[in-house]
Amino acid sequence: MITACSCGNNGSPSPCMTRAGRSSRRCSSKATRHDRSLVKIGRWFPGSKLCSVCGAVADSMPLNVRSWACPCGAVHDRDVNAAKNILAAGRAERLNACGGTVKPAA
């Protein structure tokens, strides 16, 4: 989800919030046009701290840590791991909406 910054100080919606809403609508209409589904995940989804192999969530991790090792033995690049987890979350939501069952990764 795209968050808004506080750059508007006159009581009106900030320009960033306006752009974020417009971007969300644009993505939604493009997905509809191409017969795709758009799934939004929560702002606090632990995508980069969630092991894409075993599902364990790492403790607090500062942003300067770019790679980390899970106790299961997997070594993750933070951005690649987040991309895998976000894709899996979107697929799980899509399968739930279609009535399929979602099983945790083995």
Image (cartoon, rainbow, N blue to C red):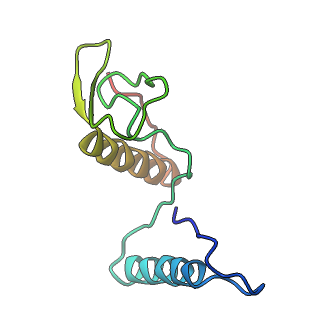
Residue at 38 percent of width and 39 percent of height: 48
* Viewport quadrant of the C terminus: top left
The single residue placed furthest to the right in the displayed view is 11
At horizontal 51% and vertical 43% (from top left) the residue drawn is 45
Residue 4 image position (x, y, % from top left): 59, 70
In the image, residue 68 sits, relative to residue 86, either above or below, namely: above
Residue 75: horizontal and vertical position, in percent? 21, 24
Identified at 52% across, 84% down, the residue is 22
Which quadrant would residue 94 be assigned to in this image?
Answer: bottom left
| In this picture, residue 60 sits left or right of residue 63 | right
Q: How many numbered dots are placed on residues in this image?
A: 0
Does 102 appear above or below 96? Answer: above
Q: Residue at x 38, y 48 (%)?
A: 86
As drawn, is 17 to the left or to the right of 102? Answer: right
**Closer-to-camera residue (64/15):** 64
Residue 24 point in image, percent of width and height: 50, 76
Left or right: 82, with 44 as reference point: left
Q: Quadrant of residue 7?
A: bottom right
* Rendered location of residue 70, percent (x, y): 31, 19
The residue nearer to you, when weighing 91 against 2, is 2
